Structure formats: C-alpha cells, structure tokens
Image (spheres, grey):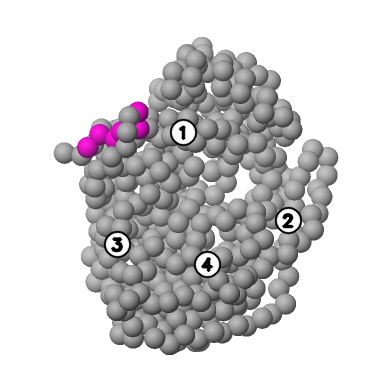
Amino acid sequence: MKKILISISVVFLFGLVVQADETCFAKEPKPDYYVDEAKLPFDSFPGLETECYWGIHNGAGYRIEVPSSWSGDLVVWAHGYRGEGLELTVDNPPHRAWLIANGYAWAASSYSKNAYDVAQGAKDTHALTKFFNGLIGKPNYTFITGVSMGGHITAVLIEQWPDSYDGAMPMCGVMADYELFDFFLDFNLVAQALAGVDAEYPPASDYMSVTVPYVRSQLGPTFPYLLNTAGEQLKAVTELRSGGDRPIFDQGFLFWSGVMGDFLFGLGAGTGSLTKVKGIAVDNVDTIYQFDEDPALTYEEEALNENVLRLERDPQSQHPNGIANVPVVSGDIKIPVLTLHTLGDLFVPFSMEQIYAQRVAENGASHLLVQRAIRDFGHCTFTPEELITGFVELVYWVKFGIKPAGDNILDPWVVADPEFGCAFTSQDRTYALPLSIPACP
C-alpha cells in the first residue's frame, strides 16, 4: 500500500455569512474554518491493495483511494450537513469496501466551509473531481453520489457541470432546495395556529423554552402519542406537506416529533436566514393547508388558513439559475439519476423526491430519472444491500443502457398502498412498538 501526502495550500476567501432581521442586513465575521491534517491519513482495508492519497486542496480536506486493479471508474462522494462548527472533516463513502473490492476509485471532500453552504460544497467537490483527473488520470466513467445536503450538492453538480459526470445517485437528498425550509416553517406555524398561539417572526428568544411546551400541551395529553383534535390536524397537515398519504408516515411522525423531542420545532426556531442568503429565505404566502386531499376546503381548513402567519421570501434570497445563495435544483438533467429515500423521514421529507420528479418531468427528462422508496423512518438509514444494488444498477444503466426499475412516486394511489416501498426495501426493519413497521409480503 502506498500512502502519499499531498498538501496544496492556497489563500481561500470565504463568502460572507449574511443574516437578516426585520430592518437591515448585518455582515457576520468570516469563520476561521480549518482542516486537522493529522486526521486525514487512512489505511486500506485488510487484503485490499490500494494507494491512498490525502491532503488539502483549495482550503478543503480530501481523501482519494485507488485500487491496484483500478477499473478506470471514479465515484465522487458528497457528505451531508456538518453543522456550524469550524473544523472541516472528510467522510469515507459508506460502501467504500465494496467499491475498492470491485475496482472503483473514490474521492471525497470536506468542503472548505460548513453550515448549509451547498454552493461551496458543489464547487469544492467539482474541484476535487478535476484534481483527481490531474493526479491519477481521467476516469472512463465518473459517478457522483451523496446523502442529505450531499444529495442537494449532487443534484447541483450534474446540472452545473453535466459533462463531468456520467451518472448520479443522490440519497435522502434535499432535492427541492428551499421547499425543505418551507416545510420546517409549515410545521411550526401550523402547530402554533392550531394551538391558538399568535406566532411571531422571527420567533421570540424563549420560543423553545416557553412557546413550544405550551403548543405541545394544546395538541394532546402526551403529544404526539395521544392527540386531541388539534394534534390530529397538525399530523394530517404534516403528512400532506411531507409526501401525502403513505406507509411509515405514522412511525415517522412519532419518531421525529416524539422520540426526537422538540426536533421539528427546533428546525423552525431560526430567522429564516441561510448561509449566503440575504433576507427571509422561507415562504408560505400561497400555501394552502389541508387536513385531507379533497381540494374543497372545509370550515376548519378555512379557519386554519386564515389564522396561520404568512411570510414572503425576499426576492434577493433566491436565484433561479447558477449556484448563488442556496442553489435551486431545476430538474434539468442530462445523465441517468437514481435516487433513494425513506418514506417516514421528516428531517428531509419524501416530498423532496416528488417535487424533484415534477421538475424533471417539466424539463422532459423523466426517462433519465429512477426513484426508489425505502420503508423506514430514519434519515438516510439504508442497508448496504439497498445502497449497493442501486449503485450497481445505475452503473449498468450508464454503461449498457439497461434502465432499472423504480417506484411511481407521483401517483397518490400507488404511494398510499400499504405495501408501497416493498419493491426496493431489502429487509424488514424491526423496531419496538409504537415504531414497528409492517413486514412486506
């Protein structure tokens, strides 16, 4: 095994993090992000002969591994959200051992910034792709894959640099960009309206300590396990806003708003500002909240829509093209894309996939998209078999034109079937009550 340390240090200018209040835009100091180079070295798997490379490129840490029997194909890995910390770290792809054993090289970047900075993650990941081409050689095929925010980055990369990648597999990805943050807003504002609370924006400093406990008390005796009418209505709105009537939603609602405590409330406790975004980044001006899929509004639904606080996204916060601010995913794809998403995930809900599918269809590119639903409520909780099977079938699609099967996620009757998601779920998940998931036949 050959270990090579390559450190390319450059002066890197970090973009300003812009936050907004109700009256002005304030520039925050540039974060002092750093890479601990002592954490970059890594070893080959026992019995798998590889060359390992690591270092810093354009302010981002990276790892590259090339098997001695390299097939000539590269897999670029995009990691998920890292939080607001200053240390930049690199993930190995979860299917690393399989990739190396099957002749694939892989490359992964830390990105040169943390926070929800998809634009920088996309630029750094693409820079690493080009760096690999110069260091090792241009691959025969280059595949890009990532999870969560890394799925968003993957979707952006293949739209901005379509000639650099041959196939993509975003998993549990934020495939509908700003719609994710609107979902967090919806949950919080609807919960407050149903609890009879006059919502404030931005939320008061005691929102989590005072407002949220009161809201929970008004939604059921032990929200979300025992719900009153208001609690059931919040659950119904959340289901429709996160992907519609579908299996595993009930377990997901209990997990993300019960087992995880105030997690969903916390996601709406900010000011609506995102890294590199000026002004309010969320919007519900035209959102119609409903308790069922009947388009006719009931008296209770009309009352809810009248009582929910309305916010409008600042025009300068979003650009429809390019990678400014939080990049918008248009769905204009030129290469095969295969996605995976768990049905009960409410951190990055299943609706992300449905919105993406609609955007791809609007671009006339549905023939290049395959999507698979997995029967779980966790975020990115895929089995190795689900991940590897998806990747192998993506490769066959790219190389031999054999398009794999997928789920019809835009047909509400199909999605509502109790057995939806069984086709590509490799094994039944076994969780204790009340989170148990019905087994597939």
The residue beneath circle 4 is: 90
Question: For the magenta stretch, what is the residue range?
Answer: 434-439
Q: Residues at badges 2 and 3 in contact (C-beta under 8 Å)?
A: no
Instruction: Give the side of residue 436 with respect to residue 55, left or right.
Output: left
Residue 19 against residue 16 in the figure, above or below: above
Label 4 to label 1: alpha-carbon separation: 29 Å
Task: First in sequence, mark 2 or 4: give its number.
Answer: 2
Q: What residue is at 72 percent from the left and 77 percent from the top?
A: 11
Label 4 to label 3: alpha-carbon separation: 21 Å
Q: Which mark is residue 17?
A: 2
Looking at the rendered structure, the kind of residue marked 4 is Val
Residue 422 is situated, as x and y percent measured from the top left of the image, at 24, 43
Residue 18 against residue 146 in the figure, above or below: above
Q: What residue is at 57 percent from the left and 79 percent from the top?
A: 55
Label 2 to label 3: alpha-carbon separation: 37 Å
The residue beneath circle 3 is: 388
**Which quadrant would the C terminus be assigned to in this image?**
top left
Task: First in sequence, mark 1 or 2: give its number.
Answer: 2
Q: How many labels does the image show?
A: 4
> Residue 321 appears in which quarter of the rendering?
bottom right
Instruction: Give the side of residue 69 with respect to residue 59, left or right.
Output: left
Residue 195 is situated, as x and y percent measured from the top left of the image, at 59, 17
Residue 383 against residue 3 in the figure, above or below: above
The residue beneath circle 1 is: 259
Please identify, in this view, whether the residue under mark 1 or under mark 2 is nearer the observer. Answer: 1
